[in-house]
Structures are given as structure tokens and as C-alpha cells.
Image: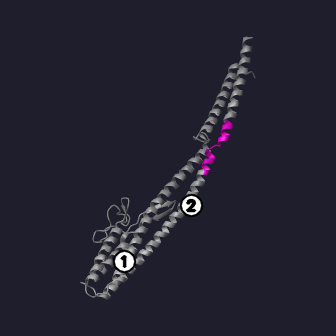
Amino acid sequence: MRISTQQMQRNLTSGLRGRMAAIARAAAEASTGRRVRTLSDDPVDAAQIMRMESQVRDIDQFRRNGTFATTKLATEDIALTTVRDVLQRAKTLAMSTTSSNPGDPGRLAALASVRQLKEEVIALGNTRVGNEYIFGGDRSTAPPFQADGTFVGDGNTRQLAINDGVNVSLTHSGQPLFTDAIAGLEDLIQQLQTGTPAQVSAAIGDLEDATQQVMQIQSETGARLKDIQDTSAALARQSAALLDRRDSLRDVDPAEAIIKAQTEQAALERAYAVVSRVLQATLTNYLS
């Protein structure tokens, strides 16, 4: 079968284009450090890379959620620790009040102090993180406690996903957590105003019950913080493994990329030499 000069030129030109495309790819790999930059470079590996990057983005969002939840729960823990301190101070005041006369200066001083402690608990019930009142349930845009201690929030608690299928409650509702503490302080205030020493002492029981409730809630808060910490650590390991796998598919070794580019360059130069000799021979035959 005779191959025409025109067909030979087309074949040579096509071969040169292939060589030029190969050297362009090799040069791009050497300059960017990436073997797969677009879907057309390697459809199978590119699809895996996109899937892994999507998983990493999901993990990053879960970890951001965990950080947000940690901030709220840690703030709640601090507030509850302060509530416990307040209730302890109130109990100390009640136990130190022995006078049966409501007008006794010591008793009046204790009354004033407990009133301030009640205001402090109400203020703690209106704790905010950013613009959100953390003890208001779903009603987080307005203070859940009025000045007199009335709760106007709701009992719902917001949940946030910290992993696929794993949710965590951000905080606890202020009711009954704070309302019981406020009620205990109100009862102590009433007994300091009109009650007998025995009645003042009896009011300590309500404060103790409120303290136990706060401790129970703090235990739950600590468990949630631990879960978030463990989940975040597991997600960090998962993300690192995915990124390592992605890089192994996407990236090239810099030294190997340079050698490949040099090899393709040498192959192109040899191809040019071959084409030059063929075209020269063809032209000579034509002239002869």
C-alpha cells in the first residue's frame, strides 16, 4: 500500500501535536505540582478527588459546629458554677442568721445580701453568647428572665450536628434550672422578712435542692463537652486521612515531574529531527 506524501505529512503533524500536548501536560504538572487539575486529566481519579473534597468540607462544617457548641456549653458551665457559688453564699447567710427579730441589723443585712444574690442569679439566667440568650430555649433573641425572676423563655433546646447522624444539645433551658434557684432565694427572702429562725433554716432545704439540680445539669454539660472533644478529634483524623489520599491522587512528586517534563522535551526534539529528515527526503525526491 502506497502512502501519499500528504498522508505522511498529516501523520507527522499529528504526532508532533501529540508530543506538544504531552510536554504541555508535563510542564503544567511540574509548575503546579498537580497531576489532576481538571476532570479531563483523569476522570476516575478526578471523581474520587471531588468526592473526598466534598467529605472534607462536610467534616469542616461539623468541626465548626462543634466549636460553636463548645463555646455555648462552656459558657453555660461557667454560669452554673457561679449559680452554685451564689446558692452557697445564700445558705451561709441563712445559717448565720439566728435572731428571731426581723428588724435585727444582722438579719436585715442578710436580707439585703440575699436580694442581691437573687438579682445575680437572674442576670446569670440572661447570659448571652453573641446575640443569643443561651437559657431561653428557642426564644433566644430576648432575655428569658424578667427583672422579678419570671421566666418568659421556653423549654426547648437547640441541637446541632457535630458528625453525620450525631447531634448535641447546645444548652439547657432556664426552666426549671434557674427558676428553682430563684424560687429558693425568694423563699429565703420571705423567711428573713417575717419568719422564725427555724423557718429561715428550713429555707436552706430548697437552696440545697436547687444546688443539686445545678450539679446534675453541670454533669450533663461536661459529658456533652467530652463527646464534642472526642468527636472533633476523630473528625480531625478522618479529614487528615482523606486529604492524604486526595493528595496522593492529585499531586505529583516535584522531582519526578521535572524529569518527566525533561523527557517529554527531549522526545519532542527527536520528533522534530525525524520530521525534518523525512520532509527533506520527500522534498529531494520531489525535485528529482
The crowd level at tag 2 (other Cα within 10 Å; few <14, some 14-19, many 20+) is: few
Res 89 label: 1
Mark 2 vs mark 1: give the one in front: 1
Q: Which residue is depicted at the point 32% across and 84% down?
A: 97
- Does residue 148 belong to the magenta stretch? no
Q: Give the spatial CA distance, label 2 vs label 1.
A: 42 Å
Left or right of 139 on screen, residue 4: right
Q: Which residue is depicted at the point 58% across and 58% down?
A: 237
| Residue 18 coordinates in the image, percent (x, y) | 65, 31
**Which badge, 2 or 1, comes first in the chain's sequence?**
1
Above or below, 103 relative to 136? below
| Residue 66 coordinates in the image, percent (x, y) | 48, 60
The crowd level at tag 1 (other Cα within 10 Å; few <14, some 14-19, many 20+) is: some
Task: Locate the N terminus by quadrant.
Answer: top right
Residue in the foreground of this view, choosing between 183 and 204:
204
The amino acid marked with disc number 2 is: Ala
Q: Is residue 170 visible?
A: no
Residue of label 2: 234
| Residue 204 coordinates in the image, percent (x, y) | 36, 83
Q: Give the dominant element type of the magenta stretch: helix, strand or loop.
A: helix
The amino acid marked with disc number 1 is: Arg
- Which residues lie in the magenta part? 244-260
Marks 2/1 in contact by CB < 8 Å: the verdict is no
Residue 27: quadrant of the picture: top right
Task: Locate the C terminus by quadrant.
Answer: top right
| Residue 117 coordinates in the image, percent (x, y) | 32, 74
